[in-house]
Every structure is written in C-alpha cells, then in structure tokens.
Amino acid sequence: MLNRIILIGRLVRDPELRYISNGTPVCNFTLAVERNYTNRDGERDVDFIRIVTWRKLAENCAEHLGKGRLVAVDGRLQIRKSEKENRTYIDPEVVAQNVQFLDWPKDSNRGQERRSASRKPDEFENAASQDSADLNDEDFDVPF
C-alpha cells in the first residue's frame, strides 16, 4: 500500500505551534494550492489543505514560516471522522514528513535567516572568504 502526497503552495496564515500533553510539539498550518487548470472564468481554483507537522519539523516550521511563504510538503493523507448531532464530518489533512522552504522570507528583521536573505550573492562570497581568512591552524584542536 502507498499513501503519499506532494504539494506546493503558499501558507494562508502563520503556523500555530502547540504542545500535546507529553510535551511533543505539533504545528498546524493551511496551504493554498492552485489547481493546474482554469475554470470557466479563466481563473485557477484554489484548494485549502490543512498540514500537520510533528516534533523538530513542527518547531522549524513555526519558527521560520509565515503567511504567504511558498513551501513544498511531502507527507501522507490522513482522514479524520467525527460525529456531531447525528452527522458525520470528514476532515482530511496531510501529515508532513518533509517541508521544503521554496522562497526567502519577506521580513528582513526576523531571525538570522531573514537577515542573510537580504544579502547579495557577492556579499556571501566576500563574507565566506573573510571568515576563512580569519582562521588559522591554532583555531583547531585535533583530538589525537
């Protein structure tokens, strides 16, 4: 049997991080995924798909993602069923096993990743060469 889903879309709102009773982190967010065809009006319809991440992946998503970010999600489809007032509700969601960040954050004031995103490519090269120029053999301890 195989249950695998791969999605690319944008976050509808900021992710929500919470911890279950045993302390395990879980992060929820909703992904807007455009369909690959147009409707009668010439527009692409959008599906809104709930995503669930667990443990370290959940903490990374909560820390680095925000509304509007483009991501790729690789995971499995999970269908939850609940009954209320003699009605059965079906709630599909994707349990993510991997989330790839596909764009740079727009806010350059939040976190180191966001500050480095505003650098130009040649600034990365200059910073890397400066870092390596500052190192010498005395900076490294050999364990044997």
Image: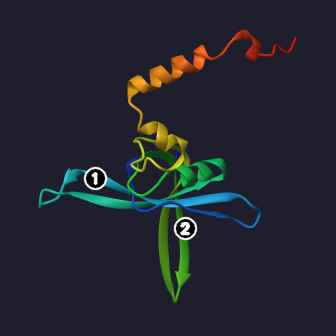
Relative to 134, residue 77 above or below: below
Label 1, label 2: how far apart the Cα atoms are: 24 Å
Tell which residue pokes out farthest to the left in this image: 41
Which residue type does callout 2 highlight? Arg
* Residue drawn at 74 percent across, 17 percent down: 139
Relative to 127, residue 61 above or below: below
Q: Position of residue 138 (x, y in %)?
A: 76, 12
- Pointer 2 residue: 80
Q: Position of residue 128 (x, y in %)?
A: 52, 21
- Mark 2, other Cα within 10 Å: few <14 / some 14–19 / many ≥20: few
Which residue type does callout 1 highlight? Arg
- Pointer 1 residue: 35
Which one is earlier in the sequence, the residue at label 1 or at label 2?
A: 1
Q: Position of residue 42 (x, y in %)?
A: 12, 56
Location of the N terminus by quadrant is top right
Callout 2: helix, strand or loop? Answer: strand
Q: Is residue 4 visible?
A: no
* Residue drawn at 50 percent across, 50 percent down: 110
26 or 89, nearer to the observer: 26
Relative to 112, residue 123 above or below: above
Horizontal relation, residue 32 to residue 35: left or right = right
Relative to 66, residue 5 above or below: above
Q: Is residue 21 visible?
A: yes
Where, by quadrant of the figure, is residue 67 drawn?
bottom left
